[in-house]
Image: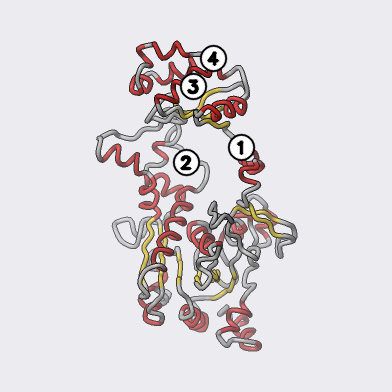
């Protein structure tokens, strides 16, 4: 359940890509110490849909991916703060940061400095475009990467594209990529390593089919909305109460679908005889199928079609899917009672992973800013009056 239970991670990251990477490491058992800027903390503490929580420094955006972590504050521009951080880095297995390239070096706490102190350290730098190249100094947020990667150009339909994906896909993919690379490095040799994660390249890596269609087949990717361009009928269709996804990608599924809908005669038409024919005439075929699908609710059709082997599913809202037993009963959501700084119970998403039948969870809620200063700095010998003096002087 906790394969990283002997690993200490220093999380110097902000907002989403880095915190999301360390969110996974925490759920896999690592001790994740969130090293936050003194007086400010992670910007995500002020972000989210609840203004009152933003004012308290416990914004929903912060709560979403920081459960199970410890929080310390430090001012890396202060000599005493920097010295304290260097001591802490000597105790760590992993450091994760998502500053612009060069910032950590200018602060005197970059990889070269930290690796001299701690040669076994795995250092992961997450940035928009990587640590070198012509775009290295460009600022990058999720939407910038979505636009630069081509994701927006293929999202929507011809009349609406380019469109932003409805959640921060570039930040999230960048975070998962970093977590994957870190766990791979931890499983490697005992020496340290420098991991350079480019959000742009991480997103492009997930676009393998689209990129390869261009590189190998010479087909320029286009925006096709809810239609699966590799097959037909495959996409969304109007049912009696909303949309249903149907993916009759195989010939045998096409047969099962048309039989079930009472439209077997469609298979005899030349325009629908083969997969390629159906792809060329997909919109006309869609209209034919919808004449029957519109007569009943989407979930009823989905149950029946799935039962006979045609992959289908109603198009759900976020609240609807979270209430489904498939999600609610598998341990994907985890709750904390009366969370300090929030003063109410909260539920957060975990990782989508199960190990030996159980979903990894963390024991503690997202931390208050600097909640663990006394504990973590105390372990390094900083206690009592010294701790108060460092705080008064702005070092922590």
Return the residue at label 4: 291
Q: Residue at x 57, y 88 (%)?
A: 381
Residue 275 is at least partly visible in this image: yes
Crowd class of label 2 (few under 14; some 14 to 19; many from 20; radius 10 Å): some
Percent of width and height locating residue 15: 53, 58
Color style of the picture? secondary structure
Percent of width and height locating residue 311: 50, 31
Circles 2 and 4: CB atoms closer than 8 Å = no
Q: Is the residue 8 above or below the residue 140 in the image?
A: below
Which disc is residue 317 wearing? Answer: 1
Could you tell me how far apart the alpha carbons at marks 2 and 4 are, in whole angstroms? 32 Å
Q: Nearer the viewer, mark 4 or mark 3?
A: 3
Could you tell me how far apart the alpha carbons at marks 4 and 3 are, in whole angstroms? 14 Å
- Specify which label sits upstream in the sequence, 1 or 4: 4
Could you tell me how far apart the alpha carbons at marks 3 and 1 are, in whole angstroms? 25 Å
Q: Quadrant of residue 291?
A: top right
Which disc is residue 164 wearing? Answer: 2
Percent of width and height locating residue 136: 34, 59
- Specify which label sits upstream in the sequence, 1 or 2: 2
- Specify which label sits upstream in the sequence, 4 or 3: 3
Percent of width and height locating residue 163: 46, 37
């Amino acid at each position: 359940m906790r394969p990283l239970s002997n690993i200490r991670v220093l999380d110097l990251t902000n907002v989403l890509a880095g915190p999301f990477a360390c969110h996974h490491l925490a759920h896999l058992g690592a001790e994740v110490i969130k090293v936050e800027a003194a007086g400010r903390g992670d910007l995500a503490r002020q972000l989210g849909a609840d203004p009152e929580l933003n004012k308290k420094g416990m914004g929903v955006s912060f709560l979403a991916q920081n459960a199970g972590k410890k929080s310390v504050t430090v001012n890396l521009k202060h000599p005493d703060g920097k010295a304290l951080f260097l001591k802490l880095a000597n105790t760590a297995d992993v450091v994760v940061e998502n500053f612009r390239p060069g910032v950590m070096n200018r602060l005197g706490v970059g990889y070269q400095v930290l690796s001299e102190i701690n040669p076994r350290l795995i250092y992961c730098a997450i940035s928009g475009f990587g640590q070198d190249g012509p775009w290295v100094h460009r600022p990058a947020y999720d939407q910038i990467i979505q636009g630069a990667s081509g994701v927006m150009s293929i999202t929507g339909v011809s009349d609406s594209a380019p469109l932003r994906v409805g959640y921060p896909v570039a930040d999230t993919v960048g975070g998962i990529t970093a977590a994957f690379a870190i766990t791979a490095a931890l499983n490697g040799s005992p020496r340290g390593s420098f991991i350079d994660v480019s959000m742009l390249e991480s997103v492009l890596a997930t676009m393998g089919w689209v990129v390869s269609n261009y590189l190998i087949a010479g087909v320029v990717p286009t925006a096709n909305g809810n239609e699966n361009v590799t097959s037909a009928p495959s996409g969304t269709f109007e049912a009696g109460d909303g949309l249903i996804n149907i993916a009759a990608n195989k010939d045998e599924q096409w047969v099962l679908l048309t039989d079930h809908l009472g439209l077997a005669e469609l298979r005899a038409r030349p325009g629908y005889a083969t997969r390629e024919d159906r792809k060329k005439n997909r919109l006309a075929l869609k209209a034919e199928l919808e004449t029957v699908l519109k007569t009943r609710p989407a979930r009823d059709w989905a149950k029946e079609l799935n039962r006979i082997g045609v992959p289908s599913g109603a198009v759900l809202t976020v609240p609807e899917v979270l209430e489904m037993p498939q999600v609610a009963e598998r341990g994907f959501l985890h709750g904390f009672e009366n969370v300090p700084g929030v003063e109410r119970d909260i539920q957060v998403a975990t990782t989508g992973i199960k190990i030996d039948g159980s979903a990894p969870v963390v024991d503690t809620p997202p931390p208050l800013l600097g909640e663990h200063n006394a504990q973590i700095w105390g372990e390094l010998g900083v206690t009592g009056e010294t701790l108060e003096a460092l705080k008064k002087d702005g070092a922590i």
